[in-house]
Amino acid sequence: MKNVKTYKNIISRIFGMGIILLFSALNSCDFCTAPTSNGGDFENILIFSGKSANTNQNVLFSSTALGSEIKAVNNKSIEIYSSPSMNSKIAYTKFDGFSASNSLYISDLDGGNETFLIKESGLFQILNPIISADAKKICFNGGFNRLLIYDMQKSSINQISSKLATNAYPTFSPDGKKLAFIENDNSNMIKIKVIDTDNLDLINIFYDNVYDGFLKSSEIGNFVNWNYDNKRIAFSFSNNGRDIIKIINIETRSEQSFDYSSDNIGIENPAVNFSKNILVFKANDGNLWARNLAENDSRLFQLTVAVSNEFYYNLGWSPDEKYLLAGNSYKDASNFEYKDLVVFDIDKENSIPKTENLYLISNNANNGFWKSK
């Protein structure tokens, strides 16, 4: 079957693991439901898109955190770029071949109550739409470094930036009330900006700061990672041969900063877990690495063993901060790309972060997200 990958001796690719549990929802039938959970975590729910067996049709699936119950929830062949809202609304685009343009839609997670919102024009594009947790706003890339928000309550479009950094993606806070994004301030500086999205007629900048440096030109994009307290954010950038991580409390304006040689390790898209005091990021070698934030040392610990043409991406901690979700991409000998969706149980042993367990949710998945609380 074309979408069943060879597991590449997955056990050998993980450092410091205990039990490894593997689940594959998409490898033997068009729409599969995994066996009933025997103690799986029902608090954290995953939503992801992938192709079912023997077809190129994109389907939305839901899953418990550890993959014990996986089911198709929407087969309209759409792609999502953010978690559904708290009331299970999703935002997506449809391409009109006649006009050669995208249109923005919103619907229930299962595809019901689909509503057309706006269509691309000569004034703007509609790329990578993300919906806020309260379902009141949809943010999208409007092309030409512009960032736009569609206001569901007013049926209006507001441009909030004309300096969106190349390959940067905006992120709503978990409560949907704020939006964080990165701008190009000039050729040698970037600006991190957080705005209040309650009133877009008069944009209230909640936080902004300028840093010397630039964003990496990564195929997975650069984004600001929110903590579930809606107060703390993390992101990374590069400057003078160093990769820098910033962890910022946007209310107190206090920040932590860590930097490492770009050549030695390389840092992208850091995800912070304040409950476990662990920072995880993707490195130049494609692996996930971690640092113990509770200890006053700069040691880094490798969590995975990526093979050639393999890397992890789009990291996100679960709402209860128990598990880390990540995409995993690799190419086989014929240069065909596979994309897994995996969940890590990462904890500390004698102050050293390590992978306790790995759960393979799907071996043919695109974007995956934790469902909003």
Image (cartoon, grey):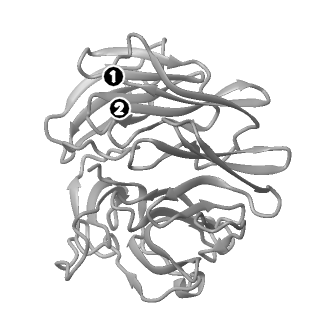
265 above or below 183? below
Q: Residue at x 61, y 44 (%)?
A: 255
- In the depicted view, which residue is nearer to us: 293 or 159? 293
Q: Which quadrant would the N terminus be assigned to in this image? A: bottom left
Answer with mark 1 or mark 2, whichever residue precedes in sequence. 2
Query: What is the number of the mark on residue 177?
Result: 2
42 above or below 11? above
Q: Is residue 24 visible?
A: yes
Q: Residue at x 29, y 49 (%)?
A: 372
Residue type beneath disc 1? Asp
- In the depicted view, which residue is nearer to us: 103 or 196? 196
The local secondary structure at tag 2 comes to loop
* Whole-percent x, y for residue 366 in the image: 43, 56
* Whole-percent x, y for residue 222 in the image: 59, 44
Image-based side of 233 in relation to 289, left or right: left
122 above or below 210? above
